Image (cartoon, rainbow, N blue to C red):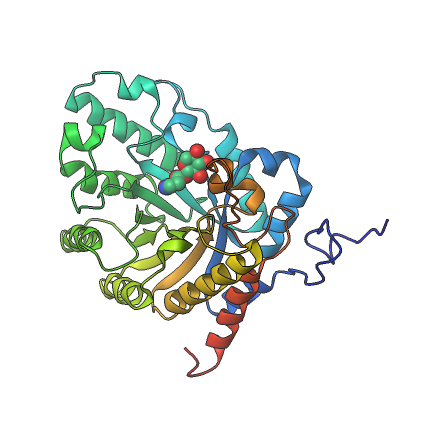
């Protein structure tokens, strides 16, 4: 057995056949472009896998707790908060000087049943929401760099997503949520994070209108997060994405890619062929994103294919590999295509 010092080797591939090593190249290339690179993080492997901690610590400088800050985890009863998972993740981040993307304060999912089944009046809900945002944001004041204040509030047809918040409180809760968060931590950046809003569609037109209105009303919203859960078989309109990101950037908003992964389970061909298609998609999305002036952060929705919500719930008979490290923690083609793209863009006039 060969023992390699962890200082030299930020991850330990299980198969020696793969000779290419990831050594923080992505983070370094991104840093040179003033872009943060991150991963969604789970409490369990962070606690129990040193390999997970090493890879995360060696390759990224930002993280998002994947589930640990959601309502059902941090606020399991009306008068009980539980920050044990979130605290551990934020501690890791503080020690490594990682930026934290807090995720998420207002969403229609991951809500505890005391809340969804509580038959609360609008006034009660307003005060519950205020207490939640004030408590959670307050706890991590100065430690969370950016909060996803709103998550997925407009649906594909451009309508407000039904939720307990919207149904009881109407549109007003949106501006209120930003203001309350701002009061709890005036230095945190406040974002609206949306799913499927990458391209130019009626959905994104509605998102754009909402954000434009909030900005014009002086609501403290500083950025927009594009989740980017991509299905490779559907393809992408890169020019549409570029134009879309550009228009949000022109509003003066910071742009983050917040939940990047690319499903390949329905692509034809061998897994090797599919991963080549995937790597090209990662490359092109990075090309587009890094050409946008206010683009500041790229977050993978999971560290490795071993810990992904896509591979967690695969339909029978399907295989997938949506992230940039495989299930053995080895860097994939996508890792190198992204790194390469960032490096090329570094040259003067090379953007
Ligand atoms: C997902 C997590 O990855 C899963 O582990 C969990 O079971 C469900 O939520 N959009 C979001 C994320 O904003 O919070 C979701 O995360 C994925 C879709």
Q: Is residue 351 left or right of residue 58?
A: left
| Residue 168 quadrant | top left
Residue 126 drawn at (x, y percent): 20, 27
Q: Nearer the viewer, residue 26 or 101?
A: 26
Q: Nearer the viewer, residue 174 or 299?
A: 299
Marks counted in the figure total 0
| Residue 333 quadrant | bottom right
Residue 237 drawn at (x, y percent): 31, 63
Residue at image location 54% in from the left, 45% down from the top: 93
Q: Nearer the viewer, residue 66 or 35?
A: 66
The relative height of residue 5 versus residue 131 in the rendered view (above or below) is below
Residue 347 drawn at (x, y percent): 48, 81
Task: Name the quarter showing ligand 1.
Answer: top left
Residue at image location 39% in from the left, 33% down from the top: 70
Q: Residue furthest right?
A: 1
| Residue 205 quadrant | bottom left
Q: Nearer the viewer, residue 82 or 309?
A: 309
Residue 319 drawn at (x, y percent): 53, 44
Q: Quadrant of the C terminus?
A: bottom left
């Amino acid at each position: 057995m060969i023992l390699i010092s962890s200082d030299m080797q930020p991850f330990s591939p299980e198969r020696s056949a793969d000779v290419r090593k990831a050594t923080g190249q992505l983070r370094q290339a991104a840093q040179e472009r003033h872009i943060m690179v991150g991963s969604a993080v789970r409490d369990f492997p962070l606690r129990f896998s040193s390999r997970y901690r090493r890879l995360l610590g060696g390759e990224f400088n930002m993280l998002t707790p994947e589930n640990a800050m959601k309502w059902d985890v941090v606020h399991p009863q009306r008068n009980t908060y539980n920050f044990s998972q979130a605290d551990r993740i934020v501690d890791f981040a503080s020690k490594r000087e990682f930026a934290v993307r807090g995720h998420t304060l207002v969403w229609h999912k991951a809500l505890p049943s005391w809340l969804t089944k509580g038959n609360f009046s609008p006034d009660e809900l307003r005060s519950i929401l205020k207490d939640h945002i004030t408590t959670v944001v307050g706890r991590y004041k100065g430690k969370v760099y950016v909060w996803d204040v709103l998550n997925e509030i407009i649906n594909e047809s451009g309508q407000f997503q039904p939720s307990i918040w919207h149904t009881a409180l109407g549109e007003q809760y949106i501006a209120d949520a930003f203001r309350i968060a701002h009061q709890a931590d005036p230095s945190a950046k406040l974002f609206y994070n949306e799913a499927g809003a990458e391209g130019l569609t009626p959905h994104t037109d509605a998102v754009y209108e909402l954000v434009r209105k909030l900005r014009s009303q002086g609501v403290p919203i500083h950025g927009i997060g594009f989740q980017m859960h991509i299905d490779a078989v559907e393809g992408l309109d890169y020019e549409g994405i570029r134009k879309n990101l550009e228009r949000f950037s022109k509003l003066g908003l910071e742009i983050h890619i917040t939940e990047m992964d690319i499903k390949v389970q329905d692509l034809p061909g061998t897994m090797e062929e599919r991963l080549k298609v995937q790597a090209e998609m990662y490359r092109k999305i990075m090309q587009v994103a890094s050409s946008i002036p206010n683009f500041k952060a790229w977050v993978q929705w999971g560290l490795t294919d071993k810990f992904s919500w896509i591979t967690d719930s695969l339909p029978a008979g399907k295989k997938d590999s949506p992230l940039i490290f495989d299930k053995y923690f080895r860097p994939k083609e996508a890792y190198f295509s992204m790194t390469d793209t960032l490096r090329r863009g570094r040259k003067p006039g090379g953007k």
